[in-house]
Amino acid sequence: MTNRTLYIVVCGAPLASRTADGVQAARANGWDPYVIPTDAAAPWLVDQLDGAPVITGNRTPDQPKRTPPADAVAVVPMTFNTLNAWANGNAYSYPLTTLCASLGARIPTITVPFAKHDLAGHPAWLASLAVLRYAGIKVLDPHDGSTSKVEPVASGTGDQLSAQFRWEWIFANLDRGQEA
Ligand SMILES: Cc1cc2nc3c(=O)[nH]c(=O)nc-3n(C[C@H](O)[C@H](O)[C@H](O)COP(=O)(O)O)c2cc1C
């Protein structure tokens, strides 16, 4: 059986340091992962993500497409910045263009918002989450994988929370979504 294609969009927050684990978990669950990092994610990424293709920047008009069409998208982690840009339909970078197009095409998508209380206290946080949920995006809490609520990250706990994050939460929900 051919593997399904998964885009892993990675934003600039501590949980980005677990991307290599996401690549391995994706393969173990029958997905071919393509990593699409924002510029801000770069400091958290290791050089070799287990050989997964890492797609950065826009292709030139004469370049062929660099990825097959996605069967699903995982945004892990999703920053406050990307959350609001995506919900507003801003497509000013390759990751955001990918996210806006995937949402428009209703490709099954799951996202893990990762922001401290100060950013999450901004009213745009709740408004953008509501927009994404309304559009069918599954929102997963980084603390326990719950899809019914999402808690902000307590200051100073980002690295610890990232270490405890389980990528299996993502794949359990993606498979559930596809059976529905
Ligand atoms: C050490 C460090 C930790 C950060 N942690 C977070 C975070 O947990 N959540 C968040 O939304 N932004 C965090 N930021 C800020 C984002 O990286 C910043 O807003 C960036 O512009 C996001 O860009 P992106 O959405 O394109 O990835 C952090 C920045 C640094 C330098």
Image: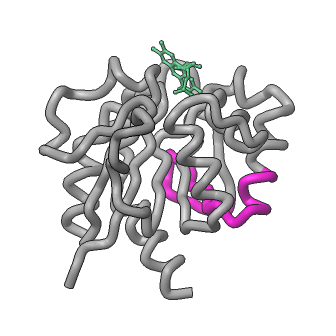
User: Measuring 28% from the left and 39% from the top, which residue is drawn there?
Assistant: 54
Tell me how the rendering is colored: one colour
**Above-or-below relation of 121 to 128:** above
Q: Is residue 142 magenta?
A: yes
User: Measuring 40% from the left and 53% from the top, which residue is drawn there?
Assistant: 7
Considering the whole magenta stretch, tell me its main secondary structure. loop
Q: Position of residue 97 (x, y in %)?
A: 58, 42
- What span is in magenta? 130-148
**Above-or-below relation of 95 to 57:** below
**Above-or-below relation of 172 to 116:** below
| Left or right: 90 as drawn, with respect to 1 | right
Q: Is residue 58 magenta?
A: no
Q: Position of residue 77 (x, y in %)?
A: 48, 39
| Residue nearest the viewer, comparing 169 with 4 | 4
Q: Is residue 161 visible?
A: no
Q: Residue furthest front?
A: 62
| Left or right: 78 as drawn, with respect to 27 | right
Total numbered circles: 0
Q: Which quadrant is the C terminus positioned in?
A: bottom right
Q: Position of residue 120 (x, y in %)?
A: 72, 30
Q: Is residue 142 visible?
A: yes
The quadrant where residue 17 appears: top left
User: Measuring 22% from the left and 78% from the top, which residue is drawn there?
Assistant: 2
**Above-or-below relation of 5 to 77:** below
Q: Position of residue 98 (x, y in %)?
A: 53, 47
